[in-house]
Image (spheres, rainbow, N blue to C red):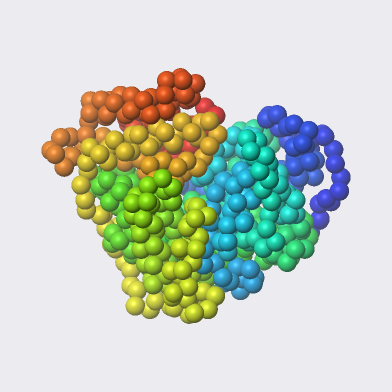
C-alpha cells in the first residue's frame, strides 16, 4: 500500500493519460475536475474496477439462484463472527447524537436549507434523490465544496432573496451512487467508470483535509449494498483513498443503508468489514420493499399488496428494523430509522394534520423500539421528529438498549404481508411512476407528489409492483385480473389525467410520452429489469 500524498495546488486544464471527460465543463467547473482530482479518481477506478465488476456479476448469479427457488439465510461460514464479542471503532463527537437527519439532493439552495434546518446531520444525496445529469453531478460537487468552506450562497432569481449558512449547521454526510451505476460522461482507459467511485473520489479529494481541519470529517452513507463483500470493497476504497492523501485510516466514517433483502442477513458481517470506518446502519425501508419484490420476482407467493398498505407495522418490516437495532447496538453502532414519505401540506389543514400524525406515529415507534435517530425529507418535520426522540432518549443515543428480547429468524424476514391489490393501487403506481420518471428525465430526482416525497426508491416500488401484478396475474379486490389489457387502459386514462392536470403546453414540452414508454416497457418486459434508473439513464 502506497502512502504518496497527491498535491492539492497544481491546476491544469489537461486530463491525465487515459482519462476522458465526455461532458461539457464550463470554466467555473474546471477546478472541481482538476488534473490532480482526476488523477486521484482514475487511480481508484483502475485499482478497484475488476473487483466491482466481479461483485456485480456475483449479484447476477445469486439472482439466478433465487429465481430457481433458493432462499436467503444467515451465512453458516460466518457463524463464529456473529457469535463473537467485538465492536466497531468509536465514532467522532459530531456523530454521537443523530436524533434527526435530513436528506435531499445536491442542489445549491437545498444544501443551504438542509444545513440550516436544525437537523443534527444532513445527507447530501448523489443517489436516489438526484437525477444524474452531468450538470447536476458536477454542480453538486461545487456546491458541497463551497458548503464545506462555508462559502456557499444562493440568490433566488425571481425574488432576489439571498440564502446563506447560519452560524450553526448540521453535520454533513454524502451518499455516492450505488455500485451498479456507471458514469457515462467519464471514461478511463476507454471504459465507462463507476458512479460510486467518481462521486466519492471527487468529494473526498477536494474536502477531506478541509473537513478534518474544521473539526469534523469525511462522512458517508453507502447505498444498496447486497452483501459483506461489497462492504469490503468500500473499505478497501476508503483505505486506499486515505493513504493516497496522507490521511489517517479510520478518519472516514460510513453508515450503511440496509435497503436490500440480502444485506439484512449480513449486517454483522457488513459492520465487521467496515469496523474501522463504520458509524452505523440505516433502515432504508423503501428500497428494502423494492428489493423484496425484485429478488423474489419469479415467485407468485411473494406478490405484495398495494404499496400504501406495506407499512413498517408489517411483520417482515418490523422484524427487519428490530434486528437492525439489536445488531447495531451489540456492535456499538448507531441504528438509524427510515424515511417517512409524508411532507407538510400548506393549503389544507385537515390533510396536513393527518400527514403529521402519520409522521409522529412513525418516529414514536422508531424511538421506542430503540433507534438512535431517524430521517426526514422536509425541514418542517425536524422538530416533530426530534420531540419524539427527546421523549425517549436520556443521553446522546440508545446504544445501551441492546434489545436482547429480539429474536428474528429467516422466516420472519421473508414473511409476505397480506393485503388487497386494488385498482386504486394500480392507478397510483402508474400515475406516480410516470410523473416521477418524467421529472427525473428533466433532471429532478426528488419530487413531491400527492403529499408524499417521491424519489427513485419509491418509483421503483411503483414500477416493480405493476410488473409483479401483471406477470403473476394478481387478482384485484373486485375480482378482475391485472393483465395487459387492463394495464393499457389504466395507462391511457392516467396519461389523460396527467395532461389535464399539467395542461397541454407543459405536457407537450415535457417528457411525459418518453416516461410512459419507458414505464410501459419495463412493466411488461418478460424479465424484471434490475433498476429503473439504468434503463432511463440513456434518455437523460
Horizontal side, residue 379 vs residue 197: left or right: left
Q: Quadrant of the N terminus?
A: bottom right
- Residue 470 appears at what percent x and percent y? 26, 34
Horizontal side, residue 304 vs residue 461: left or right: left
> For this rendering, which residue is in front, 144 or 350?
350
Residue depicted at x 50% and y 35%: 440
Indicate whether 482 appears above or below 386: above
- Residue 37 appears at what percent x and percent y? 76, 45
- Residue 435 appears at what percent x and percent y? 42, 33
Residue depicted at x 85% and y 38%: 12
> For this rendering, which residue is in front, 157 or 379?
157
> For this rendering, which residue is in front, 100 or 69?
100
Residue depicted at x 44% and y 36%: 436
Horizontal side, residue 185 vs residue 415: left or right: right
Q: Is residue 427 visible?
A: yes
Image-quadrant location for residue 415 = bottom left
- Residue 515 appears at what percent x and percent y? 43, 28
Q: Quadrant of the C terminus?
A: top right
Amino acid at each position: 500500500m502506497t502512502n504518496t500524498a497527491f498535491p492539492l495546488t497544481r491546476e491544469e486544464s489537461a486530463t491525465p493519460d487515459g482519462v476522458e471527460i465526455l461532458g461539457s465543463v464550463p470554466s467555473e467547473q474546471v477546478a472541481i475536475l482538476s488534473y490532480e482530482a482526476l488523477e486521484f479518481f482514475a487511480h481508484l477506478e483502475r485499482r478497484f474496477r475488476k473487483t466491482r465488476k466481479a461483485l456485480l456479476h456475483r449479484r447476477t448469479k445469486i439472482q439466478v439462484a433465487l429465481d430457481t427457488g433458493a432462499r436467503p439465510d444467515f451465512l453458516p461460514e460466518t457463524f463464529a463472527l456473529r457469535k463473537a464479542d467485538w465492536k466497531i471503532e468509536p465514532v467522532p463527537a459530531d456523530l454521537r447524537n443523530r436524533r434527526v437527519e435530513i436528506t435531499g439532493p445536491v442542489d445549491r439552495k437545498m444544501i443551504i436549507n438542509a444545513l440550516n434546518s436544525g437537523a443534527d446531520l444532513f445527507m447530501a444525496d448523489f443517489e436516489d434523490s438526484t437525477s444524474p445529469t452531468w450538470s447536476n453531478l458536477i454542480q453538486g460537487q461545487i456546491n458541497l465544496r463551497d458548503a464545506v468552506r462555508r462559502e456557499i450562497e444562493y440568490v433566488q432569481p425571481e425574488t432576489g432573496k439571498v440564502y446563506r449558512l447560519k452560524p450553526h449547521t448540521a453535520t454533513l454526510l454524502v451518499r455516492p451512487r450505488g455500485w451498479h451505476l456507471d458514469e457515462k460522461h467519464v471514461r478511463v482507459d476507454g471504459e465507462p467508470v463507476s458512479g460510486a467511485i467518481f462521486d466519492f473520489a471527487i468529494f473526498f479529494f477536494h474536502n477531506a483535509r478541509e473537513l478534518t481541519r474544521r473539526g469534523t470529517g469525511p462522512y458517508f452513507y453507502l447505498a444498496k449494498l447486497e452483501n459483506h463483500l461489497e462492504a469490503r470493497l468500500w473499505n478497501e476504497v476508503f483505505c486506499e483513498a486515505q493513504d493516497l492523501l496522507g490521511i489517517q485510516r479510520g478518519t472516514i466514517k460510513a453508515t450503511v443503508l440496509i435497503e436490500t433483502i440480502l444485506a439484512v442477513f449480513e449486517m454483522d458481517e457488513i459492520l465487521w468489514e467496515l469496523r474501522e470506518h463504520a458509524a452505523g446502519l440505516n433502515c432504508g425501508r423503501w428500497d428494502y420493499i423494492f428489493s423484496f419484490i425484485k429478488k423474489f420476482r419469479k415467485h407468485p407467493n411473494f406478490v405484495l399488496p398495494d404499496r400504501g398498505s406495506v407499512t413498517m407495522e408489517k411483520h417482515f418490516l418490523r422484524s427487519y428494523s428490530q434486528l437492525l437495532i439489536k445488531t447495531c447496538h451489540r456492535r456499538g453502532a448507531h441504528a438509524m430509522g427510515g424515511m417517512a414519505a409524508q411532507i407538510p401540506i400548506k393549503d389544507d389543514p385537515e390533510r396536513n394534520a393527518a400527514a403529521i400524525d402519520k409522521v409522529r406515529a412513525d418516529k414514536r415507534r422508531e424511538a421506542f423500539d430503540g433507534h438512535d435517530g431517524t430521517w426526514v425529507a422536509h425541514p418542517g418535520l425536524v422538530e416533530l421528529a426530534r420531540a419524539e426522540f427527546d421523549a425517549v432518549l436520556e443521553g446522546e443515543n440508545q446504544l445501551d438498549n441492546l434489545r436482547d428480547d429480539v429474536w428474528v429468524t429467516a422466516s420472519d424476514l421473508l414473511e409476505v404481508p397480506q393485503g388487497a391489490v386494488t385498482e386504486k393501487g394500480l392507478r397510483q403506481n402508474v400515475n406516480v411512476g410516470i410523473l416521477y420518471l418524467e421529472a427525473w428525465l428533466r433532471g429532478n430526482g426528488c419530487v413531491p407528489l400527492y403529499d408524499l416525497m417521491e424519489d427513485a426508491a419509491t418509483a421503483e416500488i411503483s414500477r416493480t409492483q405493476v410488473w409483479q401484478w401483471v406477470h403473476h396475474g394478481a387478482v384485484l379486490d373486485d375480482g378482475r385480473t391485472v393483465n395487459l389489457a387492463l394495464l393499457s387502459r389504466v395507462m391511457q386514462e392516467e396519461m389523460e389525467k396527467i395532461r389535464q392536470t399539467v395542461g397541454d403546453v407543459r405536457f407537450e414540452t415535457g417528457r411525459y410520452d418518453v416516461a410512459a414508454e419507458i414505464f410501459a416497457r419495463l412493466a411488461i418486459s418478460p424479465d424484471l429489469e434490475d433498476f429503473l434508473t439504468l434503463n432511463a439513464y440513456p434518455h437523460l
